[in-house]
Image: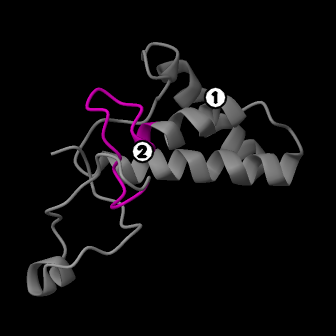
């Protein structure tokens, strides 16, 4: 598993080196899910291997989700507090109740 994650993360790291925000996930539909997956894999890699070589990659992907992106907007509802974050999200409980649910990851910047 360590070798599998290392292989994937090294390929993502190469793409990240070409991005001004340091992110290397694909920019496709639901790309924020991919950013979260990169951060998760980097955390698991560190836990399994004891190596922190992908920690900067993990932090760049977390920062992307929290607002260090071209829109300066968090991709997680109401996190961080009192900052720009998604409001009118595409989720059934929002459509029915019009009440935000703190901590919901949106699919992407659109």
Judged by its main secondary structure, the magenta piece is loop
The residue positioned 42% from the left and 17% from the top of the image is: 19
Q: Which residue is mark 1?
A: 10
| Residue 11 or residue 23, whichever sits in front | 23
Q: Secondary structure at mark 2?
A: helix
Give the image location of residue 8, x and y in percent.
59, 38
Give the total of numbered labels: 2
Q: Residue furthest left?
A: 95
Give the image location of residue 85, x and y in percent.
29, 51
Q: Which residue is mark 2?
A: 65
Q: CB of mark 2 within 8 Å of CB of mark 1?
A: no
Q: Residue furthest front?
A: 82
Q: Secondary structure at mark 1?
A: helix
The alpha-carbon separation of the residues under discs 2 and 1 comes to 20 Å
Vertical comparison of 19 with 33: above or below: above
Report the span colored magenta: 64-79
Position of the N terminus by quadrant: bottom right
Which circle, 2 or 1, is nearer the viewer? Answer: 2
């Amino acid at each position: 598993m360590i070798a599998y994650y290392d292989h994937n993360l090294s390929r993502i790291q190469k793409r990240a080196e070409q991005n001004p925000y340091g992110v290397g996930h694909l920019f496709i539909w639901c790309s924020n899910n991919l950013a979260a997956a990169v951060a998760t894999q980097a955390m698991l890699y560190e836990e399994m291997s004891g190596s922190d070589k992908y920690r900067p990659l993990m932090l760049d992907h977390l920062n992307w989700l929290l607002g260090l992106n071209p829109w300066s907007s968090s991709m997680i509802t109401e996190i961080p507090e009192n900052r720009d974050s998604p409001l009118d999200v595409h989720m059934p409980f929002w459509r029915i109740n019009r009440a935000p649910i703190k901590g919901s990851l949106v699919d992407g910047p659109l």
